[in-house]
Amino acid sequence: MATYADNRKARFDYEILEKYEAGIELLGVEVKSVRGGRMLLEGAFVIVRGGEAFLINAYIPPFQPQNVFADYDPLRNRKLLLTKKEIAALAGSERNKSLTIAPIAVYNKGKKIKVEIALVRGKKKRDKREDIKKREVGRELRRMMKDR
């Protein structure tokens, strides 16, 4: 299972509450570009409208810019493929103003391209500082163990 894109900023800025795996509708030029690792998830989010989930603001440049049709938009909305039960759960959670649905990673599962989305809550500044301290302490311990 290869990971094509990872949203590290979302993992730092948000506390992950629940994860879901979704398929994604892509055009042929987008599939080749994603498999080439050229997708960006920073600033992307998911909305639920009309019983369907959409990935908004995910940047996928065309595989060959000179061979793409004229009105191609790399930031277009892309439909996510989820079950009705999952969509209903996400729609109910989306009504809560303190929660957001964010894409975490894009990877393959067999020949399919999947998006890992998560129900997230924003972290406070002090929580981010704690994460940074834990990371620094872990690095220091690894350095000390390496020197021994």
Image (cartoon, rainbow, N blue to C red):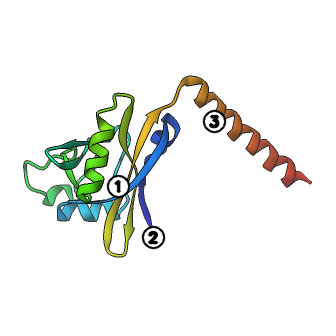
On the rendered image, what quadrant is the C terminus found in? bottom right
Residue at (63, 28) in percent of width and height: 129
**Which kind of residue does numbered mark 2 sit on?**
Met
Cα distance in 3D space between marks 3 and 1: 28 Å
Residue 26 position in % (x across, y down): 20, 60
Label 2 SS? loop
Give the residue number, with chain letter if any, for mark 1: 38
Label 2 environment density (alpha carbons within 10 Å; few <14, some 14–19, many ≥20): few
Give the residue number, with chain letter if any, for mark 3: 131
On the rendered image, what quadrant is the N terminus found in? bottom left
Kindly give the residue lying farthest to the top in the view shown: 125
For residue 121, say whether it is visible. yes
Label 1 environment density (alpha carbons within 10 Å; few <14, some 14–19, many ≥20): some
Choose the circle earlier in sequence order: 1 or 2: 2
- Nearest to viewer (mark 3 / mark 1): 3
Label 1 SS? loop
Give the residue number, with chain letter if any, for mark 2: 1
**Which kind of residue does numbered mark 1 sit on?**
Arg
Q: Is residue 127 above or below residue 68?
A: above
